[in-house]
């Protein structure tokens, strides 16, 4: 066997004691993460957010075919104050990857190298694992499906993965930036009105649709007002808006006093209602971060690819995208849009859903079922919290 050029390094670092099984494997030392870069970098970024695993430096093993993803990892790390050093390797060269892994161990001096074996090709993972095990260095695998940190060396054990992924973190891992978002108070004036409407959405939906049509005749510079229908439900809705100070009644007309009321009537109430339900139940649902009307821009593409998400949130280190449709008939392309956005921003672990005011057509229901998308229809809005809890595994 050819002597390893890193043998001297083994001797110098031999004073590190064995890792105790009952404590977190790397808590007691300053560490350097060694990551195997692949097309999905979420498994390389999440450990950088876990307090007990946090490092001030990453050594990334990078092959030519994943250069773009290595740049995402570096950008993510820099935002969190973490330095990144790259070691270039070949994805299917076992001996070459092993040498690269040994170089990563040497580059980590004087700190302790810890290998995240989740990414890369299988050959990269096997070669790097063998190198780290031979050097007595810790190795872990991130089981995102079950939210576990699986330690493979020097002792085999598992620990719970805490929920640390925020909306901006998830987007950056996919090559996007959060250009802006709203995070209103779910117990604020508009939030409470949206909540009130949502409890009896089927009753108020036709009235809101008529109000929207009436408002469409008003220019933005003119007083925002609409005619009130001679209907008990319409009268109750008008009374509620007057009661909270959002409107005033003038005969058969309702004039809106708050700038945001038109957006609310136009359909924004459904987004605000959904956001409010999730925000109020944030602890129960295990939601780490949530945003309304999130504006997304790409680091890597033209501005034409920028988009806006009605609601985006993270829970248990997954990204969830929800589209809210208040039209009496949801558009036929909504399922396609949600599926594209879920895949683009959340990757393989991302999930998406549609919250619509009306009943969905059978074809739309089948499409959602086939794609594993959540579908919440108007009659189910009062049970939205329980439905989402079951969907994300929080019930």
Image (cartoon, rainbow, N blue to C red):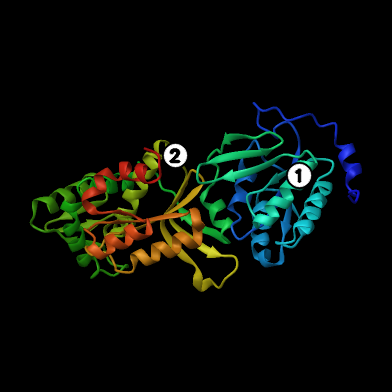
In the image, residue 57 above or below residue 53: below
Q: Nearer the viewer, residue 181 or 175?
A: 175
Task: Report the residue at 84% width, 41% height from top.
Answer: 110
Q: Position of residue 240 (x, y in %)?
A: 20, 46
Residue receiving disc 1: 132
In the image, residue 246 above or below residue 393: below
- Is residue 190 at least partly visible in the picture? yes
Q: Position of residue 56 (x, y in %)?
A: 73, 44
Residue receiving disc 2: 286
| Left or right side of 295 for 74 | right
Q: Are marks 2 and 1 in contact (CB under 8 Å)?
A: no
Q: Position of residue 244 (x, y in %)?
A: 25, 45
Q: Residues within 10 Å of mark 1 (few under 14, many from 20)?
A: many
Q: CA distance from mark 2 to mark 1?
A: 35 Å
Q: Nearer the viewer, residue 367 or 254?
A: 367
Secondary structure beneath label 1:
helix
Q: Nearer the viewer, residue 292 or 339?
A: 339
In the image, residue 244 above or below residue 345: above
Q: Position of residue 292 (x, y in %)?
A: 42, 53
| Left or right side of 365 for 65 | right
Task: Report the residue at 89% width, 37% height from top.
Answer: 11
């Amino acid at each position: 066997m050819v002597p390893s050029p890193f043998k001297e390094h083994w001797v110098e670092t031999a004073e590190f004691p064995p890792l105790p099984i009952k404590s977190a494997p790397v808590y007691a030392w300053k560490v350097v993460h060694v990551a195997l870069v692949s097309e999905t970098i979420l498994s390389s970024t999440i450990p950088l957010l876990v307090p007990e695993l946090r490092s001030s430096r990453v050594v990334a093993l990078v092959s030519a075919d994943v250069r773009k993803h290595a740049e995402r990892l570096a950008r993510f790390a820099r935002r969190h104050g973490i330095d990144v050093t790259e070691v270039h390797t070949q994805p299917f060269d076992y001996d070459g990857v092993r040498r690269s892994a040994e170089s990563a161990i040497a580059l980590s001096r004087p700190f302790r190298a810890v290998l995240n074996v989740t990414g890369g090709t299988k050959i990269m993972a096997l070669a790097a694992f063998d190198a780290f095990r031979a050097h007595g260095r810790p190795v872990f695998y991130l089981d995102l499906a079950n939210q576990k940190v699986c330690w493979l060396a020097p002792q085999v054990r598992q620990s719970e993965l805490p929920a640390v992924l925020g909306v901006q973190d998830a987007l950056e891992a996919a090559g996007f930036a959060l250009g802006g978002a709203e995070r209103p108070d779910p117990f604020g004036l508009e939030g409470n009105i949206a909540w009130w409407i949502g409890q009896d959405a089927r009753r108020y939906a036709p009235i809101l649709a008529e109000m929207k049509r009436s408002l469409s005749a008003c220019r933005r510079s003119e007083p925002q007002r609409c005619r009130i229908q001679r209907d008990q439900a319409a009268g109750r809705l008008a009374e509620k808006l007057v009661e909270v100070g959002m409107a005033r009644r003038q005969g058969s007309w309702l004039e809106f006093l708050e700038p945001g009321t038109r957006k609310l009537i136009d359909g924004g109430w459904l987004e605000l209602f959904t956001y409010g339900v999730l925000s109020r139940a944030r602890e129960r649902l295990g939601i780490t971060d949530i945003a309304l009307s999130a504006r997304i821009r790409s680091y890597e593409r033209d501005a034409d690819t920028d988009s806006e998400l009605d609601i985006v949130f993270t829970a248990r280190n997954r990204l969830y995208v929800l589209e809210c449709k208040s039209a009496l008939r949801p558009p036929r392309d909504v399922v396609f849009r949600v599926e594209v956005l879920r895949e683009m921003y959340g990757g393989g672990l991302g999930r998406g859903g549609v919250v619509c005011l009306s009943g969905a057509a059978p074809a739309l229901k089948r499409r959602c079922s086939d794609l594993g998308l959540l579908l919440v229809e108007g009659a189910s809005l009062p049970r939205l919290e329980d439905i989402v809890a079951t969907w994300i595994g929080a019930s």
